[in-house]
Image: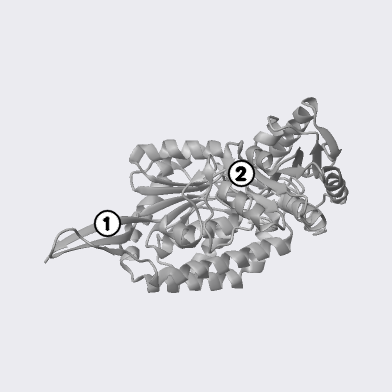
């Protein structure tokens, strides 16, 4: 059985076999590894190492930091197969999907390396003669990165790469469901030759995470997680007025107009809802279908949902894999049962499968209403409620009648409809005639309770900077 320990200041620490986290393969439920829990002393060591390393790291020319990031990307590519194998075992993904996630993370790391010569300040005209105003961009310092379980390799680099290129150092807490791949990345960091202390990776429980996030040397906390996790991080930030960057829950709506390509839309919706068992913050969570096509579109969805089979993707990649834990499965099933009590009709799925692993079938619900819990709360699983509408204004009203505003989707061939939705949808992203994909040159940022700040692109990179105003008389 694989065992791992904290990576601090360029070294793996001694394992504490009396305090560890079991890592399970969600397709079987079996323990495949153990990761030592960091204690408070180790957390203080990691933050101190990051703080010491930050000053010289931040003073390096950005192009030199970019060189390290390119070496890290090379190491990720070289180790993509082994990292993918680790990730597949702890997440339930197929080996191919997990390897591709690693390669995509490497490509995104290279993208952020390209910002080295583009971290720009401003020259601002002054109202006074013989005076120049400069606005400079500077690193924040030590960044605490809190990583989710669903795409742990990609999200780790999504946080780490922009933090490093802008001159920060990081202390990373991976999800306790998927920590093994994070320590594979630590070895890639070693292979790339990054200076000790620039990257530190520790597995920990919530009490120790609080110690990390409230440490006086931590200047920023970046999280991808639930709304409740975001509220907790905001409480942590209050201790030292640390900067938060939060990518939180979503409930992505799809509006399907009468002129849409129904076959294409149905196939894309089912693929989005069943990829990684629906465990993606931008996965489709509710569908609004025009009344004139509702029954025909529901029949399309029903047929495609029924054709989705569950199973271990390590053995058969054509099947939909498991949820991350039995607790997640039980919570999702309870939501489906409450929806049925509230009047929803189960078109496919809606039951707890027998056998090992944390599987749940692709579940399609009709006869849903806007006020139902299944429409209002994020399921983060392969469950899809379908609702009908009569006018585009009604569809927009229902899509916007929500606590979340992360992503949204529209299927139409009418440019006037597309422009109207683009100007009125209350979400950080709108995808037209395609599913959400979070292009790393864009800006992935939510409205409402879906977050503060964001990831990706120029604006995501600048999240990891602070400004200094310099006013010079001459």
Horizontal and vertical percent position of residue 238: 37, 37
Horizontal and vertical percent position of residue 364: 81, 41
Asked if residue 107 is positioned above or below residue 180 in the image, the reply reads below
Q: Which residue is under mark 1? A: 468
Horizontal and vertical percent position of residue 195: 40, 66
Asked if residue 440 is positioned above or below residue 15 in the image, the reply reads below
Query: Which is nearer the N-term, disc 2 or disc 1?
Result: 2
Residue at (40%, 40%) from the top-left corner?
A: 237
Cα separation, mark 2 vs mark 1, equals 34 Å
Residue at (49%, 62%) from the top-left corner?
A: 457
Going by the image, does 25 lie left or right of 156? right
Q: Which residue is under mark 2? A: 250
Residue 154's quadrant in the figure?
bottom right
Going by the image, does 356 lie left or right of 203? right
Pointer 1 local density, CA inside 10 Å: few below 14, some 14–19, many at least 20: few
Q: Nearer the viewer, residue 105 or 312?
A: 105
Q: Is residue 193 visible?
A: no
Going by the image, does 71 lie left or right of 176? left
């Amino acid at each position: 059985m694989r065992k791992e320990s904290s990576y601090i200041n360029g070294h793996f620490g001694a394992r504490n076999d009396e305090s560890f986290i079991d890592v399970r393969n969600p397709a079987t439920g079996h323990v495949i590894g153990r990761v030592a829990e960091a204690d408070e002393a180790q957390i203080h060591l990691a933050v101190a190492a990051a703080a010491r390393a930050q000053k010289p790291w931040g003073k390096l020319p950005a192009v030199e930091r970019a060189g390290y990031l390119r070496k890290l990307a090379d190491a990720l590519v070289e180790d993509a197969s082994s990292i993918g194998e680790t990730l597949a075992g702890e997440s339930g993904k197929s080996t191919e999907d997990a390897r591709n996630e690693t390669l995509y993370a490497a490509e995104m790391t290279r993208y952020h390396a390209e910002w080295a010569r583009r971290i720009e300040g401003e020259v601002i005209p002054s109202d006074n003669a013989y005076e120049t105003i400069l606005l400079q961009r500077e690193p924040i310092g030590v960044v605490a990165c809190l990583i989710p379980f669903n795409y742990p390799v990609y999200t780790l680099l999504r946080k780490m790469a922009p933090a490093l290129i802008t001159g920060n150092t990081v202390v990373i807490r991976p999800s306790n469901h998927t920590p093994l791949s994070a320590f594979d990345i630590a070895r890639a960091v070693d292979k790339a030759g990054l200076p000790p202390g620039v990257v530190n990776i520790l597995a920990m429980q919530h009490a120790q995470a609080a110690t990390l996030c409230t440490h006086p040397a931590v200047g920023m906390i970046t999280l991808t997680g639930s709304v409740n996790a975001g509220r907790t991080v905001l409480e942590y930030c209050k201790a030292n007025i640390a900067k938060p960057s939060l990518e939180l829950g979503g409930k992505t709506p799809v509006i399907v107009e009468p002129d849409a390509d129904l076959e294409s839309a149905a196939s894309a919706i089912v693929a989005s809802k069943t990829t990684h068992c629906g465990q993606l913050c931008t996965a489709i969570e509710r569908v609004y279908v025009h009344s004139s096509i509702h029954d025909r579109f529901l029949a399309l969805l029903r047929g495609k949902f029924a054709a989705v089979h569950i199973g271990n993707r390590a053995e058969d990649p054509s099947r939909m894999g498991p949820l991350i834990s039995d607790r997640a499965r039980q919570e999702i099933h309870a939501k489906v049962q409450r929806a049925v009590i509230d009047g929803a009709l189960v078109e496919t799925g809606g039951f707890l499968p027998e056998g090992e692993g944390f599987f749940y079938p692709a579940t399609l619900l009709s006869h849903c209403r806007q006020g139902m819990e299944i429409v209002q709360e994020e399921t983060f699983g392969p469950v899809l409620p379908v609702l009908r509408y009569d006018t585009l204004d009604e569809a927009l009203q229902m899509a916007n009648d929500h606590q979340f505003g992360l992503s949204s989707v529209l299927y139409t061939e009418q440019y006037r409809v597309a422009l109207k939705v683009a100007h009125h949808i209350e979400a950080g992203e709108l995808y037209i005639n395609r599913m959400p994909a979070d292009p790393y040159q864009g800006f992935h940022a939510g409205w409402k309770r879906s977050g503060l700040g964001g990831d990706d692109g120029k604006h995501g990179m600048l999240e990891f900077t602070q400004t200094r105003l310099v006013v010079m008389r001459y």
